Amino acid sequence: MNPISSLLQLRTQLKHQQHRALVILSGSSSWQNAILQSGWTESETILWIGETEKNLQKGILANIQSTEPTRITERLGQEIDSVILDVRAGLSANTLGIASGMIRAGGVFILLTPSVDTWATLPNPDNQRFLNSPYQPEDANPYFTQHLIQQWQADAATPAIWQHESENNAANAPFKIPKALQTHFNKSSNILPPPLPTEDQVQAIQAIDSVAFGHRKRPLVLSADRGRGKTSVLGLAAIHCLMEGKSHIVLTASRLEQTKMAFIQAMDALAALQASHAIQITTQQAGRIEFEWKGQSKLFEFIAPDQLIIDATTADLLMVDADQALKTTSPNGFCHHVAWL
């Protein structure tokens, strides 16, 4: 394989192989800035976690969205081209898990860190939530950080791509690809797979179909790691069930934004079906899709959990996306069928 000498070239290779990668830029802000300039195109979107010097973002062509680490849960269910996190803003397992699950194939999760020796002793602001007054993060040993460094430096099943300014301060220094990732890069893949449901997603759609058209009041619980397309499969399953005879399907979650991908996938599915079916879309807006099919009205909509408690829905199928909604939602009395994800 030819040497990878830029972030954009790395991402091109990742897209070719339908992979994601963790990239750790360990060095000064000016050096990190030089590497980040060539990583994205204008049509792409980056989620930037935590406050960082604004000059570090200058020159990056992509659309940059910012959020605080404490508000990362509001992004559940969304997709993004890449994520950048400055470890000085704090680092938690929850942030890592949610953010990594948002990244599309071909994307990267970039950690901006000082030199490794400095980072290993750097106070972690996230530790504040575990401390009682008057203790501060400076008083707590950053064991979690040290554990991550140890794991990511090992050439194991969870490979990380390290770039150290101390080893080569050139912005175009070749990226060192760990063996665990090199194996995938060496595979020949000239044609990308079409954006169709995966085998697991097809099985999930079939399971939801069984719930919708099978026994009454028998819930279905589907679980998978973040980033496996659970929210997307809800939208695909909703259109499938509506086309097969259901009239009204409700999707609930902590926030409407959390279900965005479900409605995007639903619209994409409808658009594809319109090529061979006489489908008339009458409403297309955030959290609500209505269409006419064989003289019948079909509705796929979002309803917040608290509204469901106040006014129980008569929908044919209720879908609950993510455990945040489960804390406030009970299926009893809502509708005949439930799919929990």
Image (spheres, helix red, strand yellow):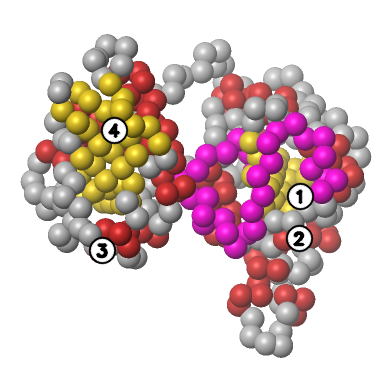
Residue drawn at point x = 27 percent, y = 46 percent: 250
Look at discs 3 and 4 and give the one toward the viewer. 4
Distance of label 2 from label 4 (alpha carbons): 46 Å
Look at discs 4 and 1 and give the one toward the viewer. 4
Say the numbered circle drawn on residue 299. Answer: none
Say the numbered circle drawn on residue 290. Answer: 4
The amino acid marked with disc number 1 is Leu
The amino acid marked with disc number 2 is Arg
**N-term mark: 2 or 4:** 2
Q: Is residue 13 above or below residue 261?
A: above
Residue drawn at point x = 59 percent, y = 25 percent: 15
**N-term mark: 2 or 3:** 2
Badge 4 crowding class, 10 Å Cα cut-off, few under 14, some 14 to 19, many 20 or more, is some
Residue 271: image location, x then y, percent: 36, 20
Look at discs 2 and 3 and give the one toward the viewer. 3
Badge 2 crowding class, 10 Å Cα cut-off, few under 14, some 14 to 19, many 20 or more, is some
Q: Which residue is mark 1?
A: 112
Distance of label 3 from label 4 (alpha carbons): 23 Å
Q: Which residue is mark 3?
A: 309
Q: Is residue 65 magenta?
A: yes
Look at discs 3 and 1 and give the one toward the viewer. 3
Say the numbered circle drawn on residue 88. Answer: 2
For residue 202, say whether it is visible. no
For residue 161, say whether it is visible. yes
**N-term mark: 3 or 1:** 1
Q: Is residue 97 above or below residue 133?
A: above
| Residue situated in front as seen by the camera: 330 or 104 | 330
Residue drawn at point x = 64 percent, y = 81 percent: 131
Discs 2, 1 touching: Cβ within 8 Å: yes
Question: Which region shows up in magenta?
Answer: 54-83
The amino acid marked with disc number 3 is Ile
